[in-house]
Image (cartoon, grey):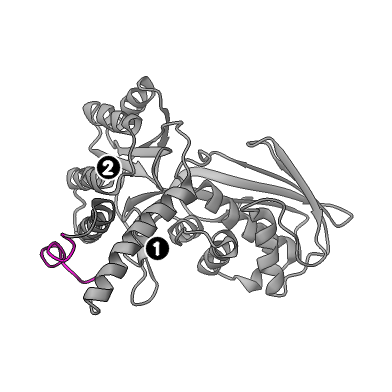
Amino acid sequence: MINRKLKVSSPGRICLFGEHQDYLNLDVIAAAISLRFFIEGEMRPDRQFLIDLPDIQEKDQFIIEGELPYQKSRDYLRSAINVLQRLGCQFDSGWNIKMHGEIPINAGTSSSSAMVVAWIKFLLEAAGRSDLAPNPETIAKLAHRAEVLEFKEPGGQMDHYTSALGGILWIKFSPSLTLTSLQAPLGAFVLGDSLEKKDTTGTLGSVRERVNQGFIFLKKRFPGINLEKINLPEILPLIKDLPLEIKNPLLGAIYNRDLTREGIKLFQAKNFDHQEFGRLLSEQQKILRELVGLSTAKIDRMLQESMESGALGGKINGSGGGGCMFAYAPENPKTVARAIEKVGGRAYIVSVDSGLRIEN
């Protein structure tokens, strides 16, 4: 039976370990956060879909009669529908829909992926075809297909799985995809939006291209090389002749891979070490700033002020070149939030949250 009214929500996310690692098939640890994207709808008597997006002051409308032509680049509303139609999903009724969120937009906290995850779920429920994606993992795959593969973009799958499943998620991509829910008594984070615009696809594409160039170079000279297995002393002499703009991001990937492994051990330990967790976050930031080139002067100031105000550690979040950072501040989040705002950021106190859900 199809509900005549629906409300679906999904969370944004922060990447705890493994920034820019998922498209290299290296492990990541991410956490869903308590800023969410909501889709509310009521069935119409005709077949019109009328969509209100007040956060970006846009509206959209269409009738679904076969594949929908894309009206703009990254037309996720239509791509999700097309992906589901190819699986046999049919839409016999129209809907009045409102989409709105709490997640900073285009700031590295997965606002677009959270929207697509929630939209896929909404559409399946609206069509009475939840059988096509009976679990969050399948919804995440469909959302990745609609957002990334459909438009041949450089993004990975971390955002979609984290938003769909929620909690703290260890994602292992090689030799096959493995999703592990991690448990830890994490306290508050302070998410800081720098309010600096960023080019997500451009930054992701640039870093990915430079790392891949270095990896292709190494594969030609050393056919058996494996980014997942090679250790730091082994790779240093192999990359010494590469240009810095290629060598540094490749080296950063190896350093961050090893820090992610330390993070996994931290979460698996009997007693969670909050101080060490903060230190590892800041170690990643150093690599992302100095080797990968993702940070900005303003985000560096926001992190410095956070640490001076009592945060245990922090890092830039997302593709970089602007957007958000976060600080781990389990004891004094309000003080850290004020420090971030003092240097011109917008602060949100957040905690780890659940994944995709239908709201009652």
> Disc 2 on helix, strand or loop?
helix
Q: CA distance from mark 1 to mark 2?
A: 19 Å
Seen from the viewer's position, the closer of residues 78 and 221 is 221
**Picture layout, residue 341 above or below residue 251:** above
Please provide percent x and percent y for residue 203. Answer: 42, 48
> Disc 1 on helix, strand or loop?
helix
Q: Is residue 325 magenta?
A: no
Please provide percent x and percent y for residue 103. Answer: 51, 41
Range of the magenta residues? 228-240
Give the amino acid type for the residue marked by disc 2 in the picture.
Arg
Circle 2 residues within 10 Å: few <14, some 14–19, many ≥20 = some
Residue at the (44%, 61%) spot, across then down:
156
Q: Report the residue that reaches farthest toward the right.
A: 46
Q: Which callout, 1 or 2, points at the residue further toward the start of the chain?
A: 1
Total count of labels? 2
Quadrant, the N terminus:
bottom right
Circle 1 residues within 10 Å: few <14, some 14–19, many ≥20 = some
The residue carrying mark 2 is 289
Seen from the viewer's position, the closer of residues 196 and 317 is 196
Residue at the (73%, 67%) spot, across then down:
128
Is the residue under label 2 in contact with that under label 1 (CB below 8 Å)? no
Give the amino acid type for the residue marked by disc 1 in the picture.
Tyr
Residue 23 shows which numbered tag? 1
Residue 128 shows which numbered tag? none
